[in-house]
Image (cartoon, helix red, strand yellow):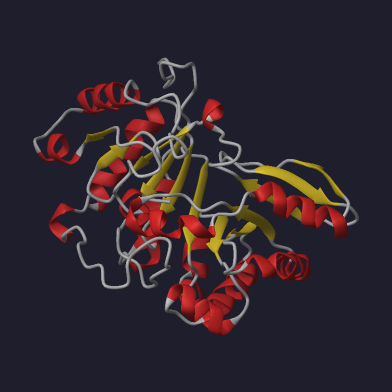
Amino acid sequence: MPKLTDRFGRTIDYLRLSVTDRCDLRCTYCMPEGFHDFETPDHWLSFDEIERVVAAFGRLGVSRVRLTGGEPLVRKGLPELAARLGELAEIDDLSLSTNAVQLARHAEALHAAGVRRLNVSLDTLDPARFAAITKGKLEKVIDGLMAAKAAGFAPIKINMVVMKGVNDDEVEAMVDFCLEHGFTLRFIETMPMGETGQAASDTYLDLREVRARLEQRFELLPGVMPGGGPARYVQVAGSDLKIGFITPISQHFCESCNRVRLSVDGTLYLCLGQEHHLGLREPLRAGVSDAGLEALIREAIELKPERHEFQDHPGQVVRFMSMTGG
């Protein structure tokens, strides 16, 4: 069967699967503190429906699935879902993005279910600053990271959104933290998604400035990492530390985009920075056949735009990141 290829010749082999739009933190650039307009549980795709969709993507050539949210660990039974997806023959890379608040008690079960790679959001190592950014407790994240390390996850990637005047003074400290614990580090530029992301636009920092700072202290060599993500990597000479730069604004990576996102309510989003989408929940609940489901996915891929327009039209995406899936 022909693989999923969009109008611009890009092969789609990576699905980011949001299992919830809810979160146990309130990061200032992601979700408003008082936000409660979540999808109702009867609108969530069930585990059976999720498995059907992922299996269809697998038959169409998608081999990588990342479980995301919101915060995926607030979805009850997540290790069970991970195990079901890990048993699909076509899926050979199952990973998880998490804030790690609840990871300490789920790490072993997730690893046993077949999840091997983790991305953990961590913007600061200062407890007071962490509370200000997320309304949460840093110690829970650190406990989760140590539990994941003990359970055998590899690689564990730390995702740090670098914000001017907020946490940009901690860049070097985060490098030292990852050197100490054997984690991979990825810096991310803020994106103008929803009113929270647009409100945070004054904290935007071009990551080329961060790299220039790091080059004053470290020798940075070209580096690569397995995975389907957009980061450009370097390696710190004399160590195993790889540092990635995710630059959707200053150096967009649209020409190599290989991914689509499925939200918890079954909406397939074709671009993080555009509103193109197609709903799968209603066809699933109306009894669509496997062939029909695959046809819908192919139809959706035809909607995938050439690129986002964060710079040209920064206010056009009104949904929050938690609604789309990270």
- The residue positioned 51% from the left and 76% from the top of the image is 104
Q: Which residue lies furthest to the left in this view?
A: 286
Look at the picture and state if 102 lies above or below 115: below
Query: Which quarter of the picture shows residue 316?
Result: top left
Judged left or right of residue 67, residue 163 is right
- Could one spot residue 112 in this view of the protein? no
- The residue positioned 48% from the left and 35% from the top of the image is 63
Q: What percent of the width, then of the height, locates residue 259?
A: 45, 35
Look at the picture and state if 146 lies above or below 289: below
Look at the picture and state if 21 lies above or below 108: above
The image shows a total of numbered marks equal to 0
Comparing 233 with 50, the one in front is 233
Judged left or right of residue 222, residue 155 is left
- The residue positioned 54% from the left and 84% from the top of the image is 128
Judged left or right of residue 104, residue 314 is left
Q: Which image quadrant: the N terminus?
A: top left
Comparing 154 with 210, the one in front is 210
Query: Which quarter of the picture shows residue 56?
Result: top left
Q: What percent of the width, then of the height, locates residue 157?
A: 62, 57
Comparing 283 with 25, the one in front is 25
- Could one spot residue 173 in this view of the protein? yes
- The residue positioned 52% from the left and 40% from the top of the image is 92
